[in-house]
Image (spheres, rainbow, N blue to C red):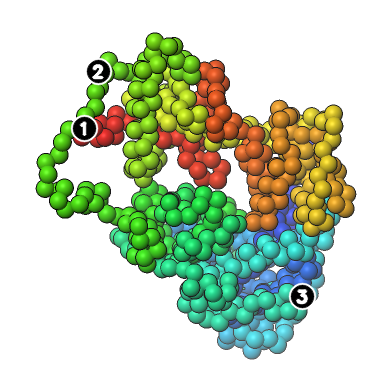
Amino acid sequence: MTNSRIKLLPDHVANQIAAGEVVQRPASVVKELMENALDAGADDIKLIVKDGGKTLIQVVDNGDGMNEHDARMAFERHATSKIASAEDLFHLQTKGFRGEALASIAAVAHVEMKTKPEDADLGTYIKIEGSKIVTQEPVATQKGTSISVKNLFYNIPARRKFLKSVQVEMRHINEEFYRIALAHPRISFTLIHNGNIQYQLPKSNRLQRISNLFGHKMQTKLVPVKESTDYIKIDGYIGKPENVKLKRGEQYFFVNNRFIKSPYLHHALRSAYEGLIKEKSYPSYFIYFEIDPKHVDVNIHPTKTEIKFDDEQTVYSILKVAAKHSLGQFNLSPSMDFDKRPDLDIPYEMQKQSPKMPDIKVDPDFNPFEEDDFGQPAKTSLKHYEKKLEYWESLMHQTQADAGDLFDQQQETGSRLNDDYQEDIEAFQFLHKFIITRRQNSLLMIHQHRAHRLVIYHKMLRQLQNGHIPSQQLIFPVELHLTVDEINMLKDYEQEIKNTGFDVQFDTETLLINGVPLEQKTLDIAEIFQEILRQLQMEAPTEKQAIEKKLASIIAGKSAIKTGQKLSPDEIKALIKDLFNITENRFTPDGKIIIVEIDSKGLEKKFT
Ligand code: ADP
Ligand code: MG
């Protein structure tokens, strides 16, 4: 018999590997421990951290506590009191259920726990280092649980080295703290950093909780949003248009008191402000959805915050309408009454007149798709061309007016666009901004800049999957003069910046760029780094992949075909082809619409 070579990994190694998934940084520990405290029914939770969580993260709760046996079991992998069978997954009320968090944390840190159930005289003290229990003994303590996590990643130097500055790690911890505190206003929370109380939040209602976190002026800057249907309930607050921020404000969605991220719903909310605020501004929002859990598919990945509603479109529309309604109701837009039907705007005297046919001559032979080379119309067809333009202009106009409608249709058909798009279909550029083409019986309007941005972005992601984007050396390296703070901020992301193809060197106040991502030679480097700094200041992503995605999105945005740029027929074709090779081609990475589609039915409707 040959020697068998397959061996089971020792538990502590398996736990360390699992930890890589659950514990990315101190903020992940904060999230897990606080969620456990919530699951244990605590109504007072304290979070104590030192050095951005690098030396200490402690959570003290007054929840159910654990008996001696459970205290020890809690650190075993797949040990959970929250589910006993797969069936239970469908009725889950708790935040955690995988039984992996404590085991993972204990594999990569020094952990101490004191815990006691209400009815016990003495509690249990446990000390664990790298998955091994070093002490377990009775201890006098109060009802509830206190867990301290010290020296995170002490036994994985590579990960410890990649922890960011105290300031950056603290920002992430704050963000987790906000999400949990906002979702649970009836629970009191305290946050102490390096011995200073940062927040002491009494039990309150949602609005008070928001202002306790973000300042009392906040109350005057918000208006309530409320809507209740059989499918979903919405309750919350959104920023008045005059208070929008130039950098990303506080934007929070909660579903059944759990924080979620949703570019799609963000879009719904943002579009309620259409015409009220500038394009590059950010309204704050705190929206709480309540919905029967059977309608949502919570991603069971431990660190994901995305969820899926079984009827996303409905949620989209309800949210948009509710938000518009509150903005209107609170008299924030006197000149704009959103829900009014246009026919009611006709002055009274005119309503009595019979409608008169507009005086327009129509060319019955006119076919907007007839001509291919639309960029340079032959002299003889100039009139024809103008007519086409008129036609498209009116169509675009109506389209914009009807954006809500269209958006829904686009939703239904978006991902199917790929299947049956034929290469030889006519396409042309309109207003140097859109590409107009068709798919079977549908008319497609494609935003050229956004489309190209998505194409580049996807290409970069593919390259990143293989490790990093190759870079090409610049003959004349570029020197950027920045502040010390800016340099430090970028330094935190050095590895990810290099992975996206920038060959960079840091000095105290200069960034030297020796190479740029392959194929993106014409980039405006200074502008890209300004944008990177701007975005990182607004929101610093947590994990390597998310950072790289963000960088790719910025680079793609800056190197994509611009609005206003004329495209040759070949360029148009190539762009359409590339776009339709991407399955999810409806939105840019930040949730902006790329394709608007009207099917023949929708088109007919416009002529009634
Ligand atoms: P999960 O939360 O997925 O069940 P964890 O590893 O986070 O897994 O926790 C394991 C178990 O330890 C929990 O199911 C719970 O029974 C117990 N536990 C953890 N933290 C606490 C706490 N703060 N109070 C009471 N019990 C806790
Ligand atoms: Mg848990």
Residue 76 picture quarter: bottom right
Question: Disc 1 marks which amino acid?
Answer: Pro
Q: Which residue is mark 3?
A: 194
Question: For the residues carrying marks 1 and 3, which lies nearer the camera in this image?
Answer: 1
Q: Amino acid at mark 3?
A: Asn
Depth order, front residue of 68/205: 205
Which residue position is annotated with label 1?
A: 358
Secondary element under disc 2, as helix, strand or loop, is: loop
- Residue 28: x and y in percent read 66, 61
Residue at 46% from the left image edge and 64% from the top image edge: 240
- Percent position of residue 14, x then y: 72, 52
User: Above or below — where is 429 with respect to 481?
Assistant: above
Instruction: Measure how far apart labels 1 and 3 are at the Cα level.
Output: 74 Å
Would you name the residue on which mark 2 appears?
Answer: 364
Ligand 2: which quarter? bottom right
Question: At numbered mark 1, what does the secondary structure look like: helix, strand or loop?
Answer: loop
CB-based contact (under 8 Å), mark 3 and mark 2? no
Work out whether mark 1 precedes mark 3 in sequence or the reverse, and give the earlier one: 3
